[in-house]
Amino acid sequence: MTLVTDPLPSTRQAPTGPGTGRLVLRHVSKAFAGAKVPALDDVSITVEPGEFVVLVGPSGCGKSTLLNIAAGMLKQDAGTVEIDGRHVTGPGPDRAVVFQDHGLFPWLDAFSNIEFGLKMRGMNKSERHDRVVEALKMVHLSNAGQKLVHELSGGMRQRVAIARSLVLNPACLLMDEPFAALDAQTRTLLHAQLQELWMTTKKTILFVTHSVGEAVRLADRVIVLHSYPGRVRRELKIDLKHPRDFDGPVLQEMGHLVRREIEDEVNRVNASMAGDFWEPKKAPHLGAGVGGMGDGI
């Protein structure tokens, strides 16, 4: 689903443009009732304006929790969150969230789903129309505006969800495994389209995924999280221009580095919880490629 982050009807625009969308999380901690260890412990991350940052790590490392805190949907126990110097105390029009579940209204067509948030803001019909048309064009669905949800493929539904976020003109886009439920071929197509979209809009993006291949394809910077509690384990900068050759040797090598970090973290957690350390045997041709896009840990 897509979170419409302006809770009250309004015609105000989120401030966007060069220098906007700087997301800063400082010393963020979060513990849930009944848990033996915090979900997050002293996490500090800065996403610069127009940067594409991807969070990866083992299941339960706090990736989605951190994203929900950045969105203002979950309150941290300690630390601060800022967007363009303003403290985040709840959802706001400067951030939009795309989830794994597209959350489209099945009784509305694609055009009306994208238009919904603008209606809630009280925008006039003519301006709504122009902005939805442009959003559909950006996600390559110009001819699908009148289709109902059940008439759209899984990939098309996620593109509508992304368009519904973009049409609100947020400074920062938060994406929580938006392509996880899609087949490998569709994911590869949407990786290319999201890359193109990001190059066009230069939105700040914080993206959560379990897929190592997805992370290195899209990110300017990959942040690997520890588990139990969630902390930053390592940051890897991918200094490659976009558009990228998804099958190039540099991305393959970066994929191996990220995957090794996650495997080591999984083994560390397993050893601490069960006292048993296991390491998989190395493949005979480790440099043969990143592998399928469902290759998360």
Image: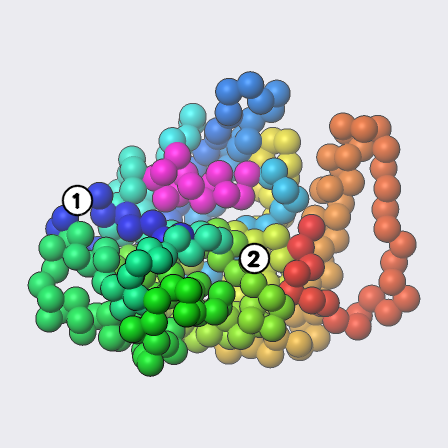
Is 39 located above or below residue 205 in the figure? above
The residue drawn where x is 51% and y is 25% is 31
The image quarter containing residue 62 is top right
- Does the magenta run of residues contain 219? no
The residue drawn where x is 12% and y is 60% is 123
Give how far across and how far down residue 222 sits, in percent: 57, 56
Give neighbour class at mark 1: few <14, some 14-19, many 20+ (Cα, 10 Å).
Answer: few
Give the colour scheme of this rendering: rainbow
Q: Is residue 282 left or right of residue 55?
A: right
Q: Is residue 135 left or right of residue 285?
A: left
The residue labelled by disc 2 is 180
Q: Is residue 288 left or right of residue 282?
A: left
Q: Main secondary structure of the magenta part?
A: helix
Give how far across and how far down residue 283 sits, in percent: 87, 62
Mark found first going from the N terminus, 1 or 2 = 1
- Does the magenta run of residues contain 65? yes
Question: Which residues fall within the magenta stretch?
Answer: 62-74
The residue drawn where x is 22% and y is 43% is 7
Three-letter code for the amino acid on which mark 1 is drawn: Leu
Three-letter code for the amino acid on which mark 2 is drawn: Ala
Is 171 located above or below residue 287 in the figure? above
The residue labelled by disc 1 is 8
Q: Is residue 211 left or right of residue 14?
A: right
The image quarter containing residue 102 is bottom left
